Image: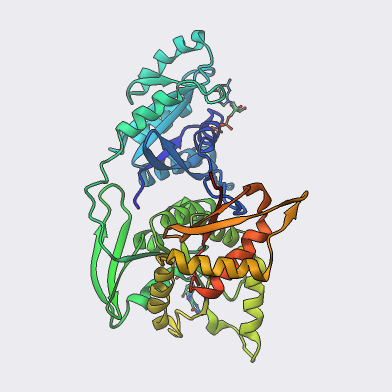
Amino acid sequence: MKMPTVAFVGRPNVGKSTIFNRIAGERISIVEDTPGVTRDRIYAHGEWLTTEFAMIDTGGIQMDDQPFSAQIRSQAEIAIEEADVIVFIVDAKSGLTDDDEQVARILYQSDKPIVLAVNKADNPETREDIYDFYALGVGDPIPISGVHGLGIGDLLDKVVENFPDLSGEVENDDIRFSLIGRPNVGKSSIVNALLGEDRVIVSDIAGTTRDAIDTRFVANDISFTMVDTAGIRKRGKVYENTERYSVMRAMSAIDQSDVALFVINAEEGIREQDKRVAGYAHDAGKAIVIVVNKWDTLKKNNHTQADFEKIIRDEFQYMTYAPIIFVSAKTKQRIDQLPDLIKRVYDNHERRIQSSALNDVIMDAIAIHPTPTVNTKRLRIYYATQVAVGPPTFVIFVNDPELMHFSYSRFLENQIRDHFDFSGTPIRIIKRSRK
Ligand code: GDP
Ligand code: GDP
């Protein structure tokens, strides 16, 4: 569940996002037919040999009203705070600059491993220029070319070598969930309301590798770990209130959770940022609960809730499976229903269906709505089987996957949902041709 994180830092234009995109781009999505919502330019997954990791392009986190030197400082601080390994990128073409030295001075203050990459070393001549960068005092420079894809493997070898060993971290059976949403929607108020009164707080788990702290508690005899509670409560540094930072933080919390509580502010409605974060949780295959907070602030009549629900369903058409709960952290209205709701969607996320029951549903579905014919060729469905949980993933064997369009997959998904309780969880349908 926990993935090591690597952050890219360096002054503007050295090639951070070029390298980030190159590494992220080499991953092929195994998920077919899900409208991809989430290719983000600051936070993404990477993979090298057998190691999966999360990546942050700190250059994407900019504070428009801040002077240049403050931006560089904030970005380096974010790298120190969030990453297990920092990749410090400099530019072979422009050579060593004062700004590079400024970044190096901030990085010295951390004991996180630093890998120095000299980008734009496109040809043998420029590779001679890397020696100047020893002066930064952060170790051996590795020549790379983001544009041409040179040296990236050597760089990643070095990165992976420096990852902490997370295998020793104890996994327990707690349901792991995170609260995600824009600043000020009320996440920390919900945390306080949830943990108030009669919940037993088992422990705060200090992260061994970063300063994120998870909180364990028991409610209704169910054990929960709330992911990155510290990140929710923290406030104050310049960048912590920026949108890009909070999106990045949310994506990282989602990665570490089974269930995402996606918090919306009833007073303000839905914003673009909400959609990106929800889309990420959906694509990541996490169970989702939509929590509409500050319900106390609305003047209500007997259709306020239905109206609000309709707006949410319109805005998030790809996740109609997510239950919506209207709460107030202030008055505690329905806060005590959250633990059971989290448990319910978690159970559905882990649900396994017997092949026989599944195939009965699929065959009945075909009888209701016969498979389509495309250019005189008819789609044939042979059988289906569930291959994974968390999220539930089904493989459907067919004569020719090309013949099964999104609309038919969606129809089958709806039929499966009508017969089994998968509320709160995305499900994945993979079509395969039978050999
Ligand atoms: P960032 O501001 O650090 O994220 O830098 P970008 O990734 O946006 O790159 C800045 C510029 O440098 C762009 O014009 C890139 O095309 C260029 N660039 C990036 N990597 C290389 C490289 O390996 N070689 C050369 N010649 N140019 C590069
Ligand atoms: P966060 O940034 O998402 O963690 O949001 P906070 O929990 O810090 O809340 C932001 C502001 O909204 C604070 O002033 C809270 O007192 C207020 N707030 C949070 N929940 C509610 C609620 O249910 N009703 C009302 N009226 N205010 C709330």
Residue drawn at (61%, 63%) of the image: 318
Residue drawn at (43%, 84%) of the image: 332
The figure's colour scheme reads: rainbow
Residue furthest out toward the bottom = 302
Q: Position of residue 262 (x, y in %)?
A: 50, 67
Q: Looking at the image, is 286 positioned above or below residue 263?
A: above
Name which quarter of the figure residue 219 lies in.
bottom left
Q: Is residue 187 left or right of residue 318?
A: left
Observer-nearest of 160 and 285: 285
Do we see residue 361 in this rendering? yes
Observer-nearest of 85 and 323: 323
Q: Looking at the image, is 99 positioned above or below residue 391?
A: above
Q: Position of residue 23 (x, y in %)?
A: 49, 34
Do we see residue 179 in this rendering? no
Q: Is residue 8 left or right of residue 310?
A: left
Observer-nearest of 317 and 402: 402
Q: Looking at the image, is 300 positioned above or below residue 259?
A: below
Q: Position of residue 292 (x, y in %)?
A: 53, 75
Residue drawn at (41%, 65%) of the image: 352
